[in-house]
Structure formats: C-alpha cells, structure tokens
Amino acid sequence: MRTDQPKMIYLKDYQAPEYLIDETHLTFELFEDHSLVHAQLVMRRNPARGAGLPPLVLDGQQLELLSVSLADQPLSVDDYQLDDSHLTLHPTSASFTLDTSVKIHPESNTALEGLYKSSGMFCTQCEAEGFRKITYYLDRPDVMSKFTTTVVAEQHSYPVLLSNGNPIASGPGEDGRHWATWEDPFMKPAYLFALVAGDLWCVEDSFRTQSGRDVALRIYVEPENIDKCQHAMNSLKKSMRWDEETYGREYDLDIFMIVAVNDFNMGAMENKGLNIFNSSAVLARAETATDAAHQRVEAIVAHEYFHNWSGNRVTCRDWFQLSLKEGFTVFRDAGFSADMNSATVKRIQDVAYLRTHQFAEDAGPMAHAVRPESFIEISNFYTLTVYEKGSEVVGMIHTLLGAEGFRKGSDLYFERHDGQAVTCDDFVKAMEDANGVDLTQFKRWYSQAGTPRLAVSESYDAAAKTYSLTFRQSCPQTPDKVEKLPFVIPVALGLLDSTGADMALRLAGEAAAQGSSRVLSVTEAEQTFTFVDIAEHPLPSLLRGFSAPVKLSFPYNRDQLMFLMQHDSDGFNRWDAGQQLSVQVLQELIAQHQQGRALVMDERLVVALGTVLADDSLDQAMVAEMLSLPGEAYLTEISEVADVEAIHAAREFARQQLADSLFDALWKRYQANRQVSKATAYVAESEHFARRALQNIALSYLMLTHKPEVLAAAIEQFDSADNMTERLTALAVLVNSPFEAEKAKALEVFAENFKDNALVMDQWFSVQAGSPLPGGLERVKALMQHPAFNIKNPNKVRALVGAFAGQNLINFHAADGSGYRFLADLVIQLNGFNPQIASRQLAPLTRWRKYDSARQALMKGELERIRASGELSSDVFEVVSKSLA
Ligand code: TRP
Ligand code: ZN
C-alpha cells in the first residue's frame, strides 16, 4: 500500500528504456517463512537512447534488499538510492552485470500478484506489473530478455518445480531439498515470467505440429482433480490445430504446460510455455461443471494458447497497447469457439454481453478508449473495453478486408514483428500494407471512447424504384473529453421483400447488383446510400451479425420485427429482432408499472415466441436464445433513468405471461429433451449443449406456473441428473420458487454432496446470491459465514458478492441503500489485502448515474465513505476518485 498520492501515467510520455537486459538468470530459494531471489542481469545501455550513462532506475516493491553488486563489485548503501518502489544505481560502463539478492514473503502475499502461495503451492502472477514484487527489474513489456530460472525447494512438499521454457538440469540438494533449472530460449518481457512449485499431478498428452514436431502437453493439478483435466486437454489440442489451420501459427517450444491454481485474480495467464490458470478455467467434467463452464474452459484454454503468438512472440510496447494482444486474442478465441460450436449462438452471447456490460462501462465514469491515453493503475484497464470492444475493432477490420485480406494482414504482422514489442498502430499498419488500404480514419476506434449511435431512416420512391437509407452517427462525450469525429462504421445489411427473401443489392452508380447481403462503410456524420431496381418497398435488415459495436436505431414497428424474426436470412438478426420486440413490449410494461396501471402485455410477443418454440427445424440453442428475454442489466443500460422495481416487475410479469400462455409447448419440449438427456450419456458437444439449453430454459419458465407436475419434474431432474448442467438448473428453479421445504432440502443435499469441491460450492453460492426473492442481502450475509466461504479466495468473492451486486439487481439496489452499504464495507475490507479484487467488485457502485436521485445520493455516499476509509490502494483510489469526479 502506498502513502503518497498515486500519479497518472500518460501515453504521450512514452520513452524507450534507457537500459536493456539481454539475459536474466534467476535463482529462487523457497522456504515456508520467506523466499530468497537472486537475480543476475546481463545489461547494457540502450543504443537507441544515445550515449551517456544516466542512472539505472529499477522497479521493485515490497522487497527486502539483501545485497547488490554492479559489475561484480558489491555496493554499499551510499552507492545506490532506495525508495518504496525503486532502486537507483549508477553504471560506469555501457555493458555490465547486476547481481541482487532480495527477501520476499510469498507465504503472506494475499494480493495474489508476484510470487504467492495458493493451497500450499508456490505460483506467480506477473502481468501487468507483478514482477517488480519478485525482484528489482526493468518491469516494462518493451524490455525483453532471455530467462534462465533455478528453483530450489523442499523435495517432499514441492516435488514439482516448473518455470518457462525447457527443463535443462535438476538434482538433489541439502536438507531434503532439490532443485531444477529451466531455460526459455525466447526473449520475453518479465510479465510473461512464471514459476510453480508444488505437489502436483499431471495429465500428459502430445501434439504433432504441422511441420512434424512433437510437443509434450501437460496439465498440472492437485491430485484430487486429476480426473477433471481431459476437457481442457482436448480443448488445447483443438486450439493448436485451429491456429495452424486458421492463422498458420505453429507452437514453438517442445513442451506446453498448464497449471491450475485455486486462488487467482483473473481467468488465466499466458506465461511462455507455462500458462497458469484459475482452476475454474481448467477443471471440467460432467458431474461437476455445467455446459457453460465447459465452454468457458474451452475458450480460455484457446485464448491463453493463442497468446503464444498474439502477445508473446509479438508483445506490447507499453501497457497503453494492451488491446493489441487482448483485443486480437479475444477475436481469435471467438473465431475458434464459433468454429467449435454454433457460430450464430456464440455471436449472440458475445453481443448480448457486450451490449449489457461494455456499453455500460462506456457510459460510466471509467469510460476509456480501446487504447487509453492515461491511467493510474494498469490493473484497472483489463476491461470489457480493452478486451471485448477491442475484439470488435479487430472484427471490423476483418469485415472490411474480408477473410483473405485479414489473413494476409495477420501474416505480415507476425512476420514483420516477431520478437518485438509493438503498438496498435503497427498492427493496423500491417493490415494496411498487406491490403493496400488506408485505415487512418478507422483508427479513431482506438482513440475515441464511447459507444456511437447510428440512427437510420429510409425513403422509398415507388416510381423510380429507388430505396434510400440515411445514416446519422454521433457519439456521446466521455470523461476524457476527447473530441468525437466520425467513425468508420461497417454496416452489413440486406433488404427483405414481402415474401421475406433477400433482394439483389445494387447501389446507384453500380453497373450490376452485388449479392444480397453486403457491407456499407458509413464514414460521414450523415450519409445516404441509394439502392436502385428495388421493385417494392423493402424491409431493411441492418447491422447483420452486429457488424459494428454501435447503438443502431431504426423505427421498426412490432409487426416488422416479427417478420424479421421469421424471415431474416441472418440468424443473428433474427434473434436481435426478437430482442427489439421484447424491449418494446417490456418498456410498455415498465411504463404501465410506473403509472400504477394494471400490466397488460402485447400478445404479439407470445405469438412470436410461440412460433419459435413450435418450429422443430430450428437449432435448439437458437430457440433457447430467442426465448431468453433481455436481462434486467440490459434494460437498465438502455434506460435514461433505470427504474429498478419497474424493470423487475415488468420482466417477471412478461415471463409469467409467457409461461402461462406457452405452457403446453414448453412442457412438450421440456419432456422430450429430458427424455433424451436421461437416455444419453453426457457429451460436451454443441448439439448436446443445445438440447440441454432448451430443456433448462423451458424448465425455468414452467416452474413459474407452480404446477405440481413441474415441481415433480424439477425434483426428478435434481435427484437423478448425471450432470451439473441439469442439476444446477433444477436447483436454481427450486431456489427461486416458493416451495420452501423442497428448496431447503435441495440446497442441503447439494451442499452435503459437494462440500469438498470448491468450484461446485461456488455455484451453490451463486445460485442463492442471484435469487431475486426478497431478503437477498440477509441470505448473502448469512452465506458469508458458511464454512465453505473464504473472503481471501477471489472465486468465492465473485460467486457470492459479485453475483449479488452484478446479477441480483432488485436486491442489490434496495431503496434503503443496504446493498450499497454492504458492498462498500466489503470493498474497504478487500482493499486491505487484495486491491485488484476490491477494485473490480466496486464496479456496480460506479454506475450511479443510471439511477434515480435518491439512489444516486446513496451510491455516491458509499463511494465517499470508501474514499475516506483510510489508505487506499492505487486500484481502488483510481476507480473511486474517477467515479466521484
Ligand atoms: N493476460 C491475461 C489474459 O489472458 C490477463 C490476466 C491474468 C491478468 N491475470 C491477470 C491481468 C492479473 C491483470 C492481473 O487475459
Ligand atoms: Zn488475454
């Protein structure tokens, strides 16, 4: 924790490093009450910074310096300067070695950054700036070095000793200790360093690359989890093959390792050759992990593997360029998941998530560009904007260049910059150069924050057979006050005739029609496109596949939306038409609730969803997505002032109406699918995900009717399912029901059966924390006393507190402010031992602008209380101060 005021760092101040580190030789001596780190750095003056020998300023935090030698000369305290984050030395020649020894305390490191202990094993997390908590170093991504690492630890407790690269030597030591040395032949920045020491078992496999090299694959876990690694291993092999086929990228070391740890601030980390994962992102088997968890494991394994090229071989020059690796790698993992499962369903889920959460971030006090201009604490910028919007930006380049052009660009990027630390501009330049295009205006997506609005209007001239679409773009101002100039917005679209077929698309001035779905580039603040040979007034299908991260509006009426739901050739837009219809109907119900009138729902929503449900030819996962009403968080995001109670009441009313009106169809599909599930062993594949998704959403509607046969079905599914997907849904519908005895029994049985499985208990906590029934806060507080809860474990905090504040809006936003007070107390507590988690849990309070003035005052009051609570980490300080600014 710091005592001075944290300071802002600016992209415009970037300067190349004064010194370089060609080689890094580390020795770790791990003990129970401290660890020693010896570093030998082979350094030289950076020739790019000219002659002269300025002071060498090394980063280092929470290190106890034991000794330091420069060019083999031991230094005394007068030879260097030390403060709480730097060691400053005075080299006397352009090339030298630097030796330091420091003492650190991984055994009491609760921030889970640097070297720490998790469930008895030693592990590291160095991104973004954690390496400076391990040893004195130039801890910045443009300083790349060749690492050799020796780990020495007690043999019995830590039989497995791992680091990056290849194992080159190992042996016994004194006093029951042993050692191993690893060498990583690739230059890398310190944030990709990793070390693991523990009592681990591993699952082994191998992969033959396209050029015929065999790579050993190992997933290390605690012994009791050895039966939960197969899905991750399969995902890894699929990822390796996919990256060869899709991007021509081959793995480069002879060994690739994944280690699962229980205490981890994020999902996983792409350390070179030694990925470290949150156990929730590795472990999966039918009995303990849901379909969603299986898909998450597959996606995260792929994401971290893909970083080997997009992040490791080509890394970031500075942390303002974070989206260079994260946006691109999310784009890559999304493409992989789309190819492994249903592409349309993957797109629907990603867009629903982006529109709910990233749009909210973009409209709040922490809004920032994909490439931010400034930050106080880089850990706060691992955001939805950098990751998901960053991926959308790469996706728009893909849309504009086409698949082949994009591949030419990515080939050039990897070839040109292999082994370098580069910028977002370098990425775009490779795309431009490979395709002979100019993306200057497009690059505003990297520098301008905020979600653009795109208002579309039409006009049809029957006599001339012309149809015009006029696009008006604008972008709300964001806290950075950067001027918003027009974006390049690729709009994929089609025009439907009265039979629902796509019409041939010929723009005025073109010699002939060019297909029936195409991409227009909107580049002006206002721009009109005119189509010719349009024989009848068409219905436009706009922004197909969500071709740009914008808020598009077109004055559709409900009948037109129903028509698009049935006929649009673009599956994504069929779903989106249903969402727009639902939003219109729900907003009408919200208004009725606010006016104190009886709620009356537009029957057309029942008809539209009934049609979808009756269509056996549709992909069942699509049916499940279409049956899902827009969430409360999304309805909040699109409100001017969100009325928490009205949104909840309207949505629950609509769900009840749908359940009552569509009971027979839902029941039929539920029973049919449950029969298949009973007769089929669990398979983690897309057709099975689809069947269970429809079965489970049907059950959640059916349960609203409180019919005895549905209750019996839920209990049957809970008792006899052979997999967590069915069991957890059954538990959730019971928890959200008024059947108190059945609910209590199910919760008790579940906890008893799974009390030894932390990841399953996380799901048990989440289901209860997310229940909208009254008394939510008291339930959460009681659960925090449960023996399986542990506030030091980030997964537990996310499962209970994150689920409550993020998903249980009606309880969290209780009008008396009790939810806010609870969250603020928790953030103050977390700030004391894990700043990254504290700062992330704070996000719901930063959204205060969305609410009525009474809630705004309560939320701001809690933010002020946090600000005044004492010594704030830079993480929490930045979020609180920007939220109150
Ligand atoms: N680079 C990681 C990823 O693939 C992100 C990450 C993992 C991270 N652990 C972290 C970021 C801790 C900050 C702090 O997305
Ligand atoms: Zn990543």
Image (spheres, rainbow, N blue to C red):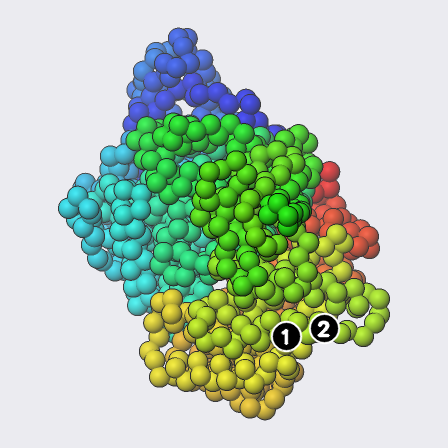
Visible residue check, residue 493 = yes
Q: Which residue is mark 1?
A: 606
**Residue 561, position as x, y percentages in the image:** 62, 62
Which type of secondary structure does the marked residue at label 2 adopt? loop
- Quadrant location of the C terminus in the rendered image: top right
Label 1 Cα crowd, 10 Å radius (few <14 / some 14-19 / many 20+): some
Q: Amino acid at mark 1?
A: Val
Instruction: Name the residue nearer the viewer: 353 or 3.
Output: 353
Quadrant (top left, top right, bottom left, bottom right) of the N terminus: top right
> Which quarter of the picture shows residue 723?
bottom left
The furthest residue to the left: 212
- The answer to whether residue 880 is above or below residue 434 is below
Residue 119 sits in quarter:
bottom left
What residue is pinned by disc 2? 601
Can you say whether 646 is above or below 642 in the image? below
**Helix, strand or loop for disc 1:** helix
Q: Earlier in the sequence, mark 2 or mark 1?
A: 2
